[in-house]
Amino acid sequence: MNSKAAPTSAEYDPAAENAPARKGVVLPFPEWPEGMVEQGAGGVMTHGRRMILMVGFLAALLILFAAITAAYSLRESTRREWSAQMSSLSLILAEQASQTMFSAHTVLDSLSDVVKQARLEDEQSYRTFVSAEARHRLLVDKTDSNPIIDVATFVSSEGRVLNFTRSFPPPPINLSDRDYFKAHRDDASIDTFTSVPVRNKGNGKWVFYITRRVNNSKGEMLGLILVGVSVEAFSKFYERVGSDLGEGASLSLYRNDFTLMTRWPFVDDLVGKKNLTSVTKHVVGDRGLKNDVVITNAPRMTEGNRTEPRMVAPRALDRYPFIVTPVITEQLYLRNWRSSLIWIVATAGLSLLLLFFGMRSLLRADRKIGDELAKRVRAQASLRAAHEQLETRVAERTAELTREIVERESIQQELGKANVRVAAISHRAGMAEVANSVLHNVGNVLNSVSVSAQLLGERLMRTPLADLPRATALLREHEQDIATYLTANESGRALPGFLDLLAQQWRAEHDMMLAETQQLKSNIQHIKDIVSRQQSLSGQSGVTESFCVRELTQDALVIHASALERSSVRVIEEYEDMPPWLGDRSKVAQIVLNMVVNAEEALVASDAQDRVLSIHCGTNADGLLEIRISDNGIGMTPEVMDKLFGYGFTTKDTGHGFGLHASALAAQEMGGALRAVSEGHDRGATFILTLPRAATP
């Protein structure tokens, strides 16, 4: 750089304007009047700042709009998802209530059938029949075999207890003042009556009764049959379900006249009282709907008439006079939305903060460029006099301006990317990921297929046969003198050996790939077999068909083969020669699969080194079809055995207690039975399914 200093304004000579410029120096600016230059620089600077502020304001509005839209969309999506879940939950509760009442009605029907078969025509014969000790044992057997039944009772036409399960002979108890007795006494057309719940004076439990009138052939009332259902059959199940939902949830069971039978959390003072101001009454009673999901802020009788926003999903049972009503508060069903809202607000705030710093940087750069431009214009006269320094200084300033312009463009690009990221984050915040799992057995086989395919791919990528084109290229190059090349040339003499090595490598790789291909075909066939076996076991429940029990059992083992192999379970099969069985194939398959799965889980939970699962299919001494599945797993204690087939009972952390209960009911529906035998803990267990030679409806 020239060390000569630029002249100051006091040293500037206007006459120098007419002096010829030195060769190689180009004056960068035309000569402008000083006032016009300042006005132009200020105008450029003001316009740039206005544009930056406008773009920043629009970007901020876009960020706020995206955040508000995402929050609102996520809230509506959360409400829709919870509405669907509440509808499903009410359906599950209705099914549980229906199954419980079906079990109780089964006991009532069986007691009623016993009385009908006696063909009693007068009250004295009725009293003599039902007061016998044999009827007491019958009541005790029916009650002990069904854990939801608290008491069963025979009552005279005057309301006196003739026989019941708690003692024999019964104490003097008169029930003529009870609602169910009055209902049957006054209206002979009532088939089955469900009472309001009452507290048992003996054990303090809440019980409601399902009752049936006993008539003679003339329609005269001989007495009543009572079956007491403990509300714990519902409240304990509701407690498990409600605890999973979280604080703010409640589950209620109403009679169809909106009398509260039970609820969770349990409130003693409200049980047995009618709730005619509830959403349940509005939906089922006033609107006449079977089920609905409603968001309301109406007062809650069960919460001291406190008003709070909540989601209510009442559902009336089809076969029984009950209504189930799950309720969750807005605090609960919007809990995850509030967590997401925090992230949305934080993301929007961070985006606005980044936008602010970006705009501030752009404004500073714009102001710096404007100030520099003004300085350059005002110093034009001085720069003309110092043209030797001007060339270097202009180059430096040009480079600096170029960097600043590039920086400004880079900041604008980053701002655009930030806007895109904000939109993407807002969109993802409003979306819920849905993941579908595949069958574990098919997944295990697909792992083997993937390993074989990967092995084939790696072998093809690293194969030495890739050098074969080089050998053929050498042969084509020496096509005219092939004999001389193969005998005299050093590389030509080595070529036959090289080709021989390639041939050996080809044979080895061919055998390996053929083996892997066979493995792939075997695994794919295995997948087809699993799917075929699953399809063969699926079918419409309730259809009677003829099928081979041995094939059905083996299909169940094939479907669960991967889990058995993974758990190192050794399977022993014994089959007797049997003709095809006539019955419900779908129900039998359900029971057998459940027995195999339970046996495999018991083996996995045990410390046995040799895990053995034995299956025996044949005919027992009574001529009944018998499928026996045994294991040497963890076994069962007598306490567990007593509750094993009860609804909702399970010993597993992740179990629900539905499988064995449903299997036992399915066996009973086909005229058979499902029972279990175990010598104790760590002594293994045996499940035995017995069915008649031909299933009865």
Image: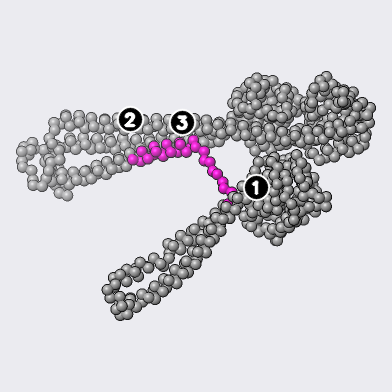
In the image, taking residue 618 as reference, residue 428 lies left or right, namely left
Q: CA distance from mark 2 to mark 1?
A: 68 Å
Residue 669 showing in the rendered view: yes
Q: Residues within 10 Å of mark 3 (few under 14, many from 20)?
A: some
Q: Residues within 10 Å of mark 2 (few under 14, many from 20)?
A: few
Pinpoint residue 667: horizontal percent, then vertical percent.
Answer: 75, 43
Relative to 74, residue 398 above or below: below
Q: Nearer the viewer, mark 2 or mark 3?
A: 3
Relative to 599, residue 177 above or below: above
Q: Residue at x 52, y 40 (%)?
A: 433
In the image, taking residue 31 as reference, residue 479 lies left or right, namely right
Task: Inspect the magenta stretch and tell me whether residue 418 lies in it.
Answer: yes
Q: CA distance from mark 2 to mark 3?
A: 22 Å
The residue that label 1 is drawn on is 537
Pinpoint residue 361: horizontal percent, then vertical percent.
Answer: 33, 38
Q: CA distance from mark 1 to mark 3?
A: 49 Å
Q: Quadrant of the C terminus?
A: top right
User: What stretch of residues is rendered in magenta?
Assistant: 413-442
Q: Residues within 10 Å of mark 1 (few under 14, many from 20)?
A: many
Identified by mark 2, the residue type is Met
In the image, taking residue 274 as reference, residue 3 lies left or right, namely left
The residue that label 2 is drawn on is 54
Q: Nearer the viewer, mark 1 or mark 3?
A: 1
Q: Magenta region's main secondary structure?
A: helix
Tell me the element at label 2: helix
Identified by mark 3, the residue type is Thr
